[in-house]
Image (cartoon, rainbow, N blue to C red):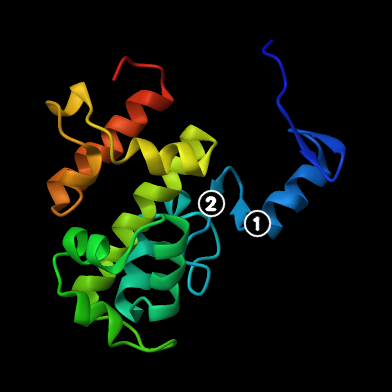
Amino acid sequence: MGRERSIVRKGRTTSKKSPLRKVEREQDGVHGGGKVILLGVAKKPESKMTTFEKIDLVDHGIPKKDLERLKEVADLDYDQLAKVLSVTRATLINKKGEDRFNTTLSEKILSLADIYSYGYEVFEDDQRFNEWIFHPNKALGGQAPYDLLDTQFGREEIKNLIGRIDYGVYS
């Protein structure tokens, strides 16, 4: 049996399996082994949603405030988001708080949030994943994962790569 990880909060160590740890993680937007990025519309981590839950979210549209959370959590600026979502910077900026994006853009936003949610779960360190996404990777022919996020095929490849890392396959 592997060693149990623990976290330190305000001078106290909390076991990874402790019920207190679960409460602490939920306060940070982390539920059931993953991080909820789109807090305004998602009830559980995007990487844990069923296809039908994702379809329902996309049909209703992702609100601007959730894009703001994704931007903050993923440590991306509007130019970087515009590139991977294949839209202009103005399209992202001009929406206000509760205004929702159209179905096409909502699908891309949810897909990106899904990748980040899964990456945070696998890497167990948001900052480490945020750095990894920009570094060239041999498994991607020397390209950085970020460079492939602008197409659905690229996003699928990144999600597969994260899955291989999760299962310990050299990637």
Left/right placement of residue 116 relative to residue 109 reads right
Q: Quadrant of residue 21?
A: top right
- Name the residue nearer the viewer: 128 or 139: 128
Which residue is disc 2 drawn over?
35
Label disc, if present, on residue 128 of the rendered structure? none
Tell me the quarter of the picture where residue 113 sits.
bottom left
Label whose residue precedes the other's in the sequence (2 or 1): 1
The x and y percentages for residue 60 are 35, 80
How crowded pointer 1 is (Cα within 10 Å; few <14, some 14-19, many 20+) is rated as few
Question: In the rendered view of the protein, which quadrant contains the N terminus?
Answer: top right
Q: Is residue 28 above or below residue 102?
A: above
Residue 63, percent across and down? 39, 80
Badge 1 is on which residue? Answer: 28
Residue 67: % across, % down:
38, 71
What element does badge 1 sit on?
Answer: loop
Against 73, residue 56 (above or below) is: below
Q: Amino acid at mark 1?
A: Asp
Residue pictured at 17% horizontal, 61% vertical: 83
Would residue 75 be visible to someone looking at this image?
yes
Judge left or right: residue 24 versus residue 130: right
The reply, left or right, for residue 98 in relation to residue 22 is left
